[in-house]
Image (cartoon, grey):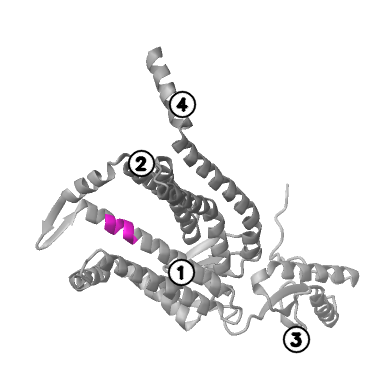
Amino acid sequence: MSDRLSLLLQQAYLFWTSPLVVYQVIILLFAAGITLFLRKTLSPRLESLAGIDGTRQLRHLLSRSGQRLLAPLSLLLWVMIGRSLLLGSELETQLLDLAIPLLLSMAGVRLVVYLLRKGFPVTPALKTWENIISFSIWTLVALHLVGILPHMLQLLDSLAVTLGETRISLLYVLKLLLLVALMLSLAFWLSALIERRMRGFTHVSPGLQVALGKFSRVFLLTLAVLLSLNLVGIDLTTLTVFGGALGVGLGFGLQRITSNFISGFILILDRSIKPGDVVTIGESFGWVQELRARYIVVRNRDGVDTLIPNENVITNEVINWSYADRNIRLRIQVEISYDDDPEQAMELMQQAASVSPRALQEPPALVNLVEFGDNGILLELRVWIADPEAGVGSVRSAINLAIWRAFKQANITIPYPQRDLHIKGPLPRQE
């Protein structure tokens, strides 16, 4: 055992100290040094190009991609240059031949992970897919290095079935899935880039931004699927039968989903509801956060999001408090005693409306005497605000507090409920 170990160590020593291997190691070390220098020099410039505000999305994307790919691509470039020099001198390049596919794999993994994180929200499922893709890429590289990859491809191609005149192999299916996944990832990334770019256009209405973003996503996803099928050699005219079957399925099993999807486009195109609108739908009151393909997101004052299907918004009555004008009117009712002067109380209530900076001066606040109630005189203050999305409870609370202070200072009382009790007949005697 010791003789075998010493023999292996001696062979390793002779291998690593041979001039041919030393040349390759020097090239690898030189490439690593140049890469470290370039990374330290170019990274600050790429960071500045990205922009802190992120308004220039394409420049931001290219700079971030450049930062991730700078190290493997720089190493790959210098290794390939060194390999060409050694081949020109008719020297061996085993180490460099091994390093090239490894560097390509590193660049591919970094690029795929970055594009996935840009096109999809970061979730545990996305991280799982990142691990699967990285493992698959490194597995292919390992099979290529040991020389098994061609035999594996032949084996996958031999596992096939024939449908009519079409031969479908396992390798064909894997290529199709890989191409569809790649094209869909690219489509999701492009649509996300377009949506972020549209949000930067202040002169475009929020409804039109959502409409263009959703249209671009549907168009790009459809185009990605069709291109993938065409690239693998599937005749698109054969999909007409599948399209007819899909139409039947949409008419029966997917009717509600299709209805919500189409209703979403109707809401976007007729611009009846936009992100930021204050709405009341049934018992739900709040602010529209998002318009999605199947539902809208309405957030109430407690921060709770309600997902309302688009079909319900189309078919039911909807109160849009900010449809034509964002100004809304608040009604604050106060009851005073019959012993107090209602005109003085009305003047104090009108003055109290100005304590809130969110209360509008035009149209001015108005106080009305509503009715003579059982317990007192009912007065109502009507005040306008222009930002209902910021909530109405704080405005109502500030004005109520100002009315209370003004009434206390003027000795105006808010009556308790009063009831008159009439006793008919004599009370029974107690013995």
- Neighbor class of circle 2 (other Cα within 10 Å; few <14, some 14-19, many 20+) is some
Farthest-out residue, left: 164
Query: Looking at the image, do the residues carrying marks 4 and 2 touch, with CB atoms under 8 Å apart?
Result: no
Comparing 271 with 52, the one in front is: 52
Find disc 3 in the rendering and name its residue. 362
Find disc 2 in the rendering and name its residue. 142
- What's the magenta region? 175-180
In the rendered structure, find residue 382 and report the number of the disc placed on it.
none
Find disc 1 in the rendering and name its residue. 191
Residue type at mark 4?
Answer: Tyr
Please, is residue 242 above or below residue 120 in the view?
below
Ranked by sequence position, the earlier of labels 4 and 1 is 4
Ranked by sequence position, the earlier of labels 4 and 2 is 4
Residue type at mark 2?
Answer: Ala
In the rendered structure, find residue 13 and report the number of the disc placed on it.
4
Ranked by sequence position, the earlier of labels 3 and 2 is 2
